[in-house]
Image (cartoon, grey):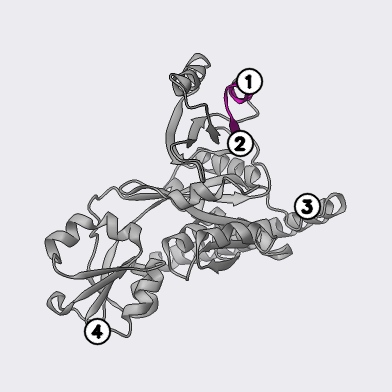
Amino acid sequence: MAKIQDIRDNIDRIDDRLLKLINQRGELAIKIGQEKSKKNSSGHFHVPHREHSIIERVTGRNNGPFPDESLTCVFREIFSATLALEKPLRIGFLGPDTTFSHQAAIKQFGHSSKFVASPNIESIFRQVENDECDYGVVPVENSIEGVINLTLDCFVDSPLLICDEIKSAISLCLLSKTKDQKKIKTIYSHTQPLGQCRQWLNRNFPNVQQIPTSSTASAARTVVRKSTCAAIAGKLAAEVYDLNIVEENIQDRVENYTRFLVIGKDEAKKVKDNKTSIMFSIKDEAGSLLKVLQLFDRNKINLTRIQSRPLRDRPWEYLFYVDLEGHIQESTVKNSMETLEKKCLFLKLLGSYPRKA
């Protein structure tokens, strides 16, 4: 036991040093904030590319035993707490609390930020546009169900830019007040999770009514008062709303990820690995899209995603949304955009931002 106590004493001494160093770091950050406040009045001192460079440096030097992901979480919380010493960031997300959007926002900005729940994706855009929030977190794509079209549509008229992206693993559970599956007559959830669990639901609840809700959290909140109903949501919702987990991991594929976008007013600066998102429309004539794709091919720019959406009020005409590797500050990407603009009826840069693996 004496040896264990010696080790614990050593841990206590390390904790004391960590506490002192974290507070010293906070004092230095306050000084930086004071210097910045003399030069600008942007309302917040968040510098995303600086955070990315710190995380890259720390994980690059990491020799264990902690994995890089754990260290990233620790430093995200340090960044969040440091910013809160001046003024907490206000982050809009698709609410209510415990949704996967809420969890993604916490993952990106840390618990010391102020999180503002919104009833729909459009209102998140409006909150950021009206300076009610510094950033918004919106879902854009799921690995099973595909793209969230409403998010793409919001970019058409919005001046906001994509500042960053978040990729989150999604594990879905069947939650209910009852533990007996036979008593469940109705299942509530957002349309995306219902789609992600379609095959499982058809096998296990072929005759049970499915009712779409605005979010997984609202589904969980609904079934709290209904003993013959269940919700599809995450484990956090089960804890918050005191529901039983009837079944875990009910999504049709084990590898289930949702990609979220961080939207804001500031351009993201170039980091080591970048992505650029654009939207454009072209003439409705033979070979027009091929010519655009050939432009990227000639400049050796890799496209990671291309998605078409109908143009509002113009039947059978389309907007194309494209993700490509690189940053707009790079000459190959910048020159390609200038050439592309001459070939398009409409071209809009949605943002260049750090690319997540």
Q: Earlier in the sequence, mark 3 or mark 1?
A: 3
Q: Which kind of residue does numbered mark 1 sit on?
A: Asn
Residue 275 is at least partly visible in this image: no
Point out the stretch of residues depicted in magenta. Answer: 333-348
Q: Residues within 10 Å of mark 2 (few under 14, many from 20)?
A: some
Is 47 displayed left or right of 2 in the figure? right
Q: Residues within 10 Å of mark 3 (few under 14, many from 20)?
A: few
Cα–Cα gap, marks 3 and 1: 36 Å
Q: In the drawing, what numbered circle is on residue 335?
A: 1
Image coordinates of residue 324 in percent, x first then y, are: 50, 30
Cα–Cα gap, marks 4 and 1: 61 Å
Q: Earlier in the sequence, mark 2 or mark 3?
A: 3
**Residue farthest to the right, as pictured:** 38
Residue 101 is at least partly visible in this image: yes
Which residue is drawn at the image coordinates 47% and 52% (left, top)?
Answer: 150
Label 4–label 1 contact, CB within 8 A? no
